[in-house]
């Protein structure tokens, strides 16, 4: 059974002249409507975001309509002050999101592990 959850990882660029120094990568498993709401609440907490990029967005096979969306963005904030306001379910850091993935097959392999 596929569980609804939010995983994230944030990298910080320590350069002096960088305004949006925190690079967030977020993976969400939920129905598509709820994914949109979670994204909105996340961006409200990490305001001043830019450089949004979707790495993966697909329906999960045999999950009764759940989707998996993985995206990245840059922000001036490196910490979520109130994670419970973003998502009340499973919400945790995942260091494996740190790894650079360059193609669709690489993301599919990550998603197969992520949905378990």
Image (cartoon, grey):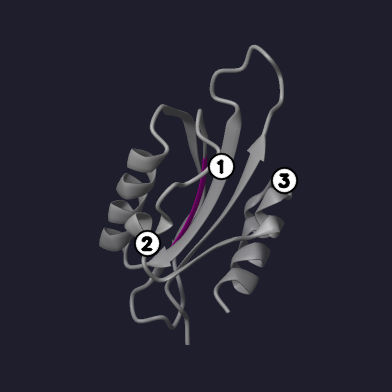
The answer to which of 69 and 58 lies nearer the viewer is 69
Q: Which residue is mark 2?
A: 87
Q: Residue at x 55, y 63 (%)?
A: 92
Q: Residue at x 60, y 27 (%)?
A: 21
59 to the left or right of 25: left
Q: Which residue is mark 1?
A: 24
Q: Nearer the viewer, mark 2 or mark 3?
A: 2
| Picture coordinates of residue 98, whole percent (x, y) | 70, 49
Q: Residue at x 47, y 88 (%)?
A: 1
Residues marked 3 and 1 touching at CB (< 8 Å) = no
Secondary structure category for the residue under label 1? strand
Which comes before the other along the chain, label 2 or label 3?
A: 2
State the mark number for residue 109: none
The answer to which of 7 and 71 lies nearer the viewer is 7
Q: Quadrant of the C terminus?
A: bottom right
Which comes before the other along the chain, label 2 or label 1?
A: 1
Which comes before the other along the chain, label 3 or label 1?
A: 1
Q: Residue at x 55, y 18 (%)?
A: 19
Q: Residue furthest top?
A: 17
| Picture coordinates of residue 78, whole percent (x, y) | 55, 38
Secondary structure category for the residue under label 3? loop
Q: Which residue is mark 3?
A: 100
61 to the left or right of 32: right
Whether 62 is drawn above or below 33: the answer is below
| Picture coordinates of residue 53, whole percent (x, y) | 50, 38
Residues in magenta? 68-72
Q: Nearer the viewer, mark 2 or mark 1?
A: 2
Task: Report the Cα–Cα distance between label 3 and label 1.
Answer: 13 Å
Q: Within the magenta stretch, is there residue 74?
A: no
Classify 10 Å Cα crowding around label 2: few (below 14), some (14-19), many (20 and above).
Answer: some
Secondary structure category for the residue under label 2? loop
């Amino acid at each position: 059974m596929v569980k609804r959850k939010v995983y994230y990882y944030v990298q910080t660029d320590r350069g002096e002249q960088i305004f949006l120094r925190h690079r967030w990568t977020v993976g969400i498993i939920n129905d598509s409507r709820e994914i949109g709401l979670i994204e909105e609440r996340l961006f409200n907490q990490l305001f001043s975001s830019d450089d949004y990029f979707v790495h993966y967005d697909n329906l999960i096979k045999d999950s009764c309509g759940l989707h998996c969306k993985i995206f990245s963005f840059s922000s001036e904030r490196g910490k979520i002050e109130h994670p419970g306001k973003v998502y009340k379910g499973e919400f945790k850091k995942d260091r494996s999101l740190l790894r650079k993935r360059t193609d669709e097959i690489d993301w599919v392999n990550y998603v197969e592990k992520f949905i378990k």
